[in-house]
Image (cartoon, rainbow, N blue to C red):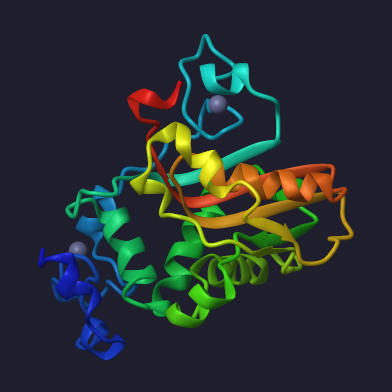
């Protein structure tokens, strides 16, 4: 695998022609056609959804809530994520894909990643009236040229045939959550979001690419609940495992 910094500098044409895997760069065999080779696909660490906490973390069978959810007020009905995320592990396939998508501007990966959302969010779908996404500040979105969470939400809405709304706006720049100790993350995003318009629904799903501590999702959910939405759900492609200082 080449270094991520050079991988993300690639343009769409460089990355996908001739057809090859976005992560390991092996040319595709005749029957492989989806941006990711079969070998890389099998390396993705999918989250076992058979018994998860409402925050989306897998639990031992004897528990119904993780220690963190047991101690905190319920903001989300449920959060679900497709696979594990490792911020600093360049060999981790899902993290590499998300970084190529987000920082490399590789929007062509949207259908692949939205397909993961479909898979992880299947149990939430019957409860969702509208879909929204974690917003960026206007300045950040202008610099990047797109909001990766919005691209994913819009593709998910298309696949699920559920309306996608811009329910939130980000009004304060925040530090990258991954750069902060776990407990400082909620403080970092406090007051960063407000309602863009009242979502006229009882239940809404917030989409994001990665959930590192759920602080951003929780802040967004609280704004929606304060605005009158009864039930808020969350869905992300990837999820960072809670660090030791989480509790
Ligand atoms: Zn590959
Ligand atoms: Zn939990």
Residue at image point 32% right, 64% down? 99
Q: Name the image quarter holding the N terminus.
A: bottom left
Quarter-of-image position of residue 219: top right
User: Percent position (x, y) of residue 122?
Assistant: 61, 48
User: Percent position (x, y) of residue 155?
Assistant: 58, 71
113 to the left or right of 196: left
Q: Is residue 238 above or below residue 171?
A: above
Q: Please name whichever residue, 226 or 30, is drawn nearer the observer in this view of the structure.
A: 226
User: Percent position (x, y) of residue 28?
Assistant: 20, 75
Residue at image point 42% right, 48% down? 177
Residue at image point 34% right, 47% down? 179
75 to the left or right of 153: right
Number of residue marks: 0
- The answer to whether residue 90 of the structure is visible from this angle is yes
107 to the left or right of 86: right
Quarter-of-image position of residue 11: bottom left
Q: Is residue 145 above or below residue 8?
A: below
- The answer to whether residue 121 of the structure is visible from this angle is no
User: Percent position (x, y) of residue 222?
Assistant: 72, 43
Q: Is residue 49 above or below residue 30?
A: above
Residue at the top extreme, as displayed = 62
Q: Is residue 220 above or below residue 26?
A: above
Residue at the left extreme, as displayed = 2
- For ligand 2, give the image quadrant: top right
Q: Please name whichever residue, 159 or 216, is drawn nearer the observer in this view of the structure.
A: 216
């Amino acid at each position: 695998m080449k270094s991520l910094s050079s991988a993300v500098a690639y343009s769409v044409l460089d990355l996908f022609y001739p057809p090859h895997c976005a992560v390991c760069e092996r040319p595709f065999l005749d029957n492989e056609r989806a941006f990711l080779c079969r070998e890389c696909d099998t390396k993705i660490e999918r989250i076992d959804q058979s018994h998860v906490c409402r925050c989306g973390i897998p639990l031992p069978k004897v528990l119904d809530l993780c220690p963190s959810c047991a101690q905190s007020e319920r903001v989300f009905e449920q959060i679900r994520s497709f696979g594990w995320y490792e911020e600093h592990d360049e060999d981790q396939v899902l993290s590499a894909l998300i970084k190529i998508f987000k920082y490399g501007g590789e929007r062509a990966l949207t259908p692949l990643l939205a397909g993961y959302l479909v898979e992880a969010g299947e149990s939430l779908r019957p409860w969702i009236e509208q879909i929204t996404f974690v917003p960026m500040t206007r300045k950040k979105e202008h610099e990047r040229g797109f909001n990766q969470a919005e691209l994913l939400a819009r593709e998910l809405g298309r696949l699920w045939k559920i309306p996608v709304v811009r329910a939130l706006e980000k009004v304060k720049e925040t530090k990258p959550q991954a750069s902060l100790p776990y407990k400082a993350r909620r403080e970092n995003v406090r007051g960063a979001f407000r309602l863009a318009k009242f979502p006229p629904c009882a239940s809404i799903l917030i989409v994001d690419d990665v959930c590192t501590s759920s602080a951003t999702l929780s802040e967004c959910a609280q704004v929606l609940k304060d605005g009158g939405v009864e039930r808020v759900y969350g869905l992300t492609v990837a999820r960072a495992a809670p660090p030791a200082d989480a509790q």
